[in-house]
Image: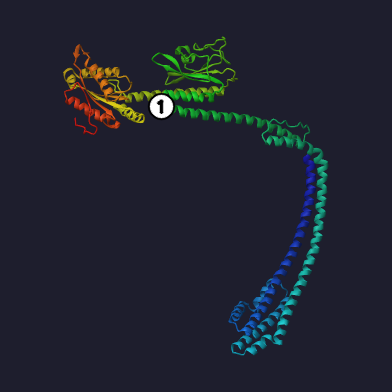
Amino acid sequence: MRLATITNWAYGATVVLTLISGGTMLLASGVQERERAAVAQRYRLDHATSAIGAEMYVLTGQARQYVITGDPTHLIVYDREEKALQSLENRTRRISEAGASPEELDLLKQALRWADTLRDEQRAAIEAYGQGQQDRARSIMFGAEYERELDRAERLIERFQYQLDQRTAAAVDAATNVSRVWRLASEVTLGTTALLFLFVLYFLFKRRVLHPVVKLSDVVARLAAQDYDVEPPAYDKIDEIGDMAQAIRVFRENGLERQRLERERSADLAMRDLLARMTQRMQACDTQQGLEEVVQRFMPEIAPALAGRLYLLDHARNMMIAGCSWLSPVHSRIEFAPIGCWALRRGVPHRHAGIEIDVPCEHLDFADGAPADSICLPLTSQRQTLGLLYLEPRDGEDYDPNQTLEIYLKMLAENIGLALANLRLRETLREMAMADPLTGLANRRALDSRFAFEVAETERLGRSFSCVMLDIDHFKRFNDDHGHDAGDAVLRAVGETLTGVTREAGMVFRYGGEEFVLLMPGLDCEQARERGEVVRQAINALTINHEGEVLGPITVSLGLASAPEHCARSRLVQVADAALLEAKAAGRNRIHISVEQDRRLPNR
């Protein structure tokens, strides 16, 4: 027989006995409620009658104190208490509402009438005292007649309270007896229910339920704590316990699967977060070196079992050059031709070992002749090859190639390629924005940026800072006599000469028209003058052939200013420009040094 059938029979009997027990308990409770109501009624009546007696004695005491002492305070208190008294009908109505019987009310009314008689005598004594008849007032309040009436009112109130006590005690005793009978019936029914429950516990639960449930409960507790290593006990009987054991086994299997999926999901979220942070850092890089540092920092976290290198394409040499590496790769050369990598040839990721055997790349070098399971990921953008991401298993590390990791690596290669493309695009745009297209020199915008940097740097180091402003003498003559192409040729030749003569890269700028600027951080006035003289002589020695005609001679005027000798560092260009005007005014083809710190700049 299934446990449900046995339990249903026991449940039915228990329900019947419980209903009977509940009914008897409700009846007993109802009787007890009547008992409590009787006690509460008695309390209310006692409180009401005690208030009547207290009022009577308060008025008597205040009146007697007044006729003895004559203190008006007692009269004031007497008047206030008398006004607070209600009429006979109101006071008896309140007692009637509290539950007093008609006989008890008649007795109470007699007591109240005697109390009102006492009030009349009290008022007569007070009036006599007010008229100066103190002896008469005291004889009224302390006379034998007043005492008899006071005793009579007190006895009537006591008789009223005695009748209340008798009636309430009888009601309480009757309710107690009935309640005891129903309580006994309820206890008998509960005892029978308990015996039935113990019978079911012994013959059903102990033999059929308790033992397997104890084992299953331990399993459930460990499963609730997510300990899915526990094995559920085998239970072959076809009943509810067997169904429960089967459900627990299914729950354990689902928990194991859920744990596996949660681990995969957590790992996937962590990896995506890592890739997102790496991508954000790469997109924020302004230089190729910064990008290489980001890749070198994040790659060991993304693929800790794989060492690798980041190769970048050197367009000038047409070679793949290793920009950075991590975890010490050993099987790929530092540089190689792009044709030596199958991934770069085909434009898709390439693996020469693993599940599918393929051709190894030429840039791999295996001393023992056994190629490792390396991965080559091309870095491309807009169908242009930018570099290569190379990965190989680390020595002594267990590398388990899986499809998920390969997907992450492909996403990473795409992000690195995009970051490289953006970096090179920004570099190209920066060069276009900062370069003069005619001479190839940096333009005035680049001068402003570099000048601000050098001013701050020389101030920080306390170094001298010199500036030379250069202008081609009679440049308009070349344009007028030979055409603008000839003028452009002269500008290009001067720019090339300046680039060749100066030692520091990026310190020559085309200021505008035929004017050029040379920044000389770290040089004082004398050193800058010597450098300027070298520049002037080199340009004087130029010979330019333009369409079969020699252009020349070419001379330049130079203005020199040094900080802090002549001016503040921030005003170097302005002061050098003023010195240039002085050189041109003095006859051109010479270098003029600024000698006054705060001179006004002349107009051109």
Number of numbered tags placed on the structure image: 1
Is 83 left or right of 496, judged from the image as shown? right
Q: Is residue 1 visible?
A: no
The image shows residue 222 at horizontal and vertical percentages of 70, 35
Considering depth in this image, is 91 or 119 the residue closer to the camera?
A: 119
Considering depth in this image, is 378 or 428 the residue closer to the camera?
A: 428
**Image quadrant occupied by the N terminus:** top right
Q: Is residue 266 visible?
A: yes
Colouring chosen for the image of the structure: rainbow
Residue at 60% over, 30% down: 263
Residue at 82% over, 57% down: 184
Instruction: Decide: few, some or many residues near mark 1? Use Cα within 10 Å; few <14, some 14-19, many ≥20.
Output: some
Position of residue 142 relative to residue 271, above or below, is: below
The image shows residue 589 at horizontal and vertical percentages of 19, 21
**Image quadrant occupied by the C terminus:** top left
Q: Quadrant of residue 51?
A: bottom right
Q: Secondary structure at mark 1?
A: loop
Considering depth in this image, is 167 or 514 the residue closer to the camera?
A: 514
Q: Quadrant of residue 503?
A: top left
Q: Amino acid at mark 1?
A: Asp
The image shows residue 354 at horizontal and vertical percentages of 57, 16
The image shows residue 546 at horizontal and vertical percentages of 21, 14
- The residue carrying mark 1 is 286
Q: Quadrant of residue 586?
A: top left
